Amino acid sequence: MKHYLLFYDVADDYMERRAAFRRAHLAAAWAATERGELVLAGALADPADGAVLLFQGDSPEVAEKFAQADPYVLNGVVKSWRVREWTTVVGEGCAMPVRPDASGD
């Protein structure tokens, strides 16, 4: 299982415009969480100019499909998005655990 970050760049009036679509966006996000696809998600703060969503799966398709169907994207609240594979090496649930060797390097 790999990790993928979905980055959202939001419209300048994001905070005002999101209210109309927030319930549907959150419903989709929680459904993705219940399916085991979405791990964490939230808006960036100070300034609120984007959001980051962490997905897990075998390919970036799970994050891409989420974005393509997201009410925020469909209604222009999100002006652009991109998915990047994230090589996680430390922490609970990381995809490729890497521990220091016995020599301390």
Image: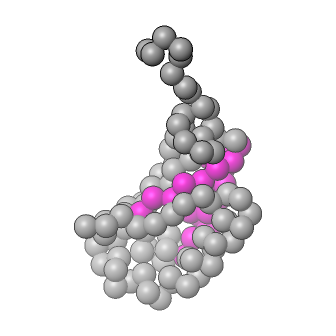
The residue nearer to you, when weighing 37 against 73, is: 37
Q: Outermost residue toward the bottom? A: 20
Instruction: Classify residue 88 by image quadrant.
Output: top right
The residue nearer to you, when weighing 62 against 31, is: 31
The residue nearer to you, when weighing 25 against 79, is: 25
Q: Quadrant of the C terminus?
A: top left
Which residue is painted at 55% across and 42% down in the image?
91
Query: Is residue 85 in sight in this rendering?
Result: no
In the rendered image, residue 75, in percent from the top left (x then y), is placed at 48, 77
- The answer to if 31 sits in the magenta stretch is no
Q: Can you say whether 99 is above or below 55 in the image?
A: above
Q: Can you say whether 80 is above or below 24 in the image?
A: above
In the rendered image, residue 94, in percent from the top left (x then y), is placed at 60, 40
- The answer to if 58 sits in the magenta stretch is yes
What colour scheme was applied to this rendering of the protein? one colour
Which residue is painted at 38% across and 83% down in the image?
17
Query: Is residue 78 in sight in this rendering?
Result: yes
Which residue is painted at 34% across and 80% down in the image?
15
In the rendered image, residue 1, in percent from the top left (x then y), is placed at 70, 41
Task: Count the marks.
Answer: 0
Q: Outermost residue toward the left? A: 46
Q: Outermost residue toward the right? A: 35
Residue bounds of the magenta highlight: 51-71
In the rendered image, residue 89, in percent from the top left (x then y), is placed at 54, 34
Q: Is residue 94 left or right of residue 11?
A: right
Which residue is painted at 42% across and 81% down in the image?
18
Q: Is residue 51 left or right of residue 73?
A: left
